[in-house]
Amino acid sequence: MKGEKQVMKAFDLLTATLNGEMTPGESWQDEFNVWQWLDQGVLHVAPLSPADSRNCDRAIVLSCAIHGNETAPIELLVDMIQQLSCSPRRLQARVLFILGNPPAVVNQTRFIEENLNRLFSASQQQAKAKNPEQQRAIDLMAAVDQFFSQALPHQRRVHYDLHTAIRDSQYPFFAVYPYHPDGFKRAAVARMQAADVNTVLLSHEPATTFSYYSHAHHQAEAFTVELGKVKPFGENDMSKLQPLKQLLNQMLYGQWPEPTIAPEQLKLFTVTRAVHRQQQDFELSFDDKLANFSQFKQGQLLGRDGDTDIVAEHDGEAIVFPNRKVAVGQRALLTVIQATPDLLIN
């Protein structure tokens, strides 16, 4: 009836992707926003009015399921999209939602043939894809390139790539800040803290992760955000993600968040080394139950790569993302040491 608010059917990103319900290029609109299905699991939502789209001051990429068994970020973004579809609100941002590796989600595995989060690079863009993950990386880089190429100069660029970790962690929520030669911004770290992510790793070198790609190629404020440990669908405590959800909602609908850093709560780490597996004969000196951020003494054995011992170089050196099962040539371990907030720049 005239005067009644139209209620849209909830749009389920996961179902639409896995069931092949959408056709690339298909678009629709609600009262405030225009929605467009760009590719399998890739959804663009922007203000309906061209003037509103030009005037919004941010372009945001939110990605999940780069590893298919990391379900909490999927549940978070699916819920946010459903809420927006059922109760339309005027966006203050152009948004690209990405469900990264749908076949791995179906398979309930980290990946099908190759770790997708090691494939985001210019060289991969130029190469001929040899497996589904390589092709997916090429497609996702193209989607991000197109999205950010349409951003106006005044629009802030953001990419939060949401994950959960393979193993337990002494700090369950933590973020990896991609390397940048000019340094790491205090305001960006403060936004992580506003999401209740108080542990941040400052990367020491370029990488081939999705967040680094957006950071390096599109000058986006980007993080890989780890939200606890991998669990099956339905077993995640989504209440712990509420601070992140509130921050994302503010980014999407409200004033740009400008929190101040809380140094007394911040646990800042610098990466000292990335250990890459070089030999088939490779082992770590600790079992798979040892938590991320566990510390070692200088000289203590961390592992062996062929005939080479890998030892801690500093007292208090901690391990992050250890994985003895990676392929030869891939990163098997990061080591980090704690740092102080004076490393951050304004």
Image (cartoon, grey):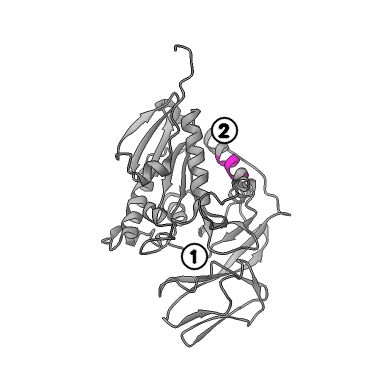
Image: 1 above or below 294: above
- Compared with 295, 201 (above or below) is above
Residue 340 position within the rendered picture, expressed as x and y whole percent measured from the top left: 68, 61
Task: Give the alpha-carbon distance from disc 2 to disc 1, as whole Å.
Answer: 34 Å
Quadrant of the frame with the N terminus = top left
Q: Which residue is mark 2?
A: 254
Q: What is the crowding at mark 1: few (fewer than 14 residues within 10 Å), some, or many (at least 20)?
A: some
- Is residue 267 within the magenta segment? no
Q: Residue 129 location, x and y as percent?
A: 28, 60
Amino acid of disc 1: Glu
250 relative position to 111: left or right: right
Please name the predominant secondary structure of the magenta segment in the image. Answer: helix
Residue pushed farthest bottom?
307
The residues colored magenta run 243-248
Answer yes or no: is residue 177 visible. Answer: no
Q: Is residue 45 above or below residue 186?
A: above
Determine if residue 235 is in view: yes
Q: Quadrant of residue 269?
A: bottom right
> In the rendering, which numbered label is found on residue 205?
1
List x then y, in percent, for residue 276: 46, 74
Disc 2 marks a residue whose amino acid type is: Gly
Which secondary structure, mark 2? Answer: loop
Direction top: furthest residue: 2
Q: Position of residue 38 (x, y in %)?
A: 33, 41
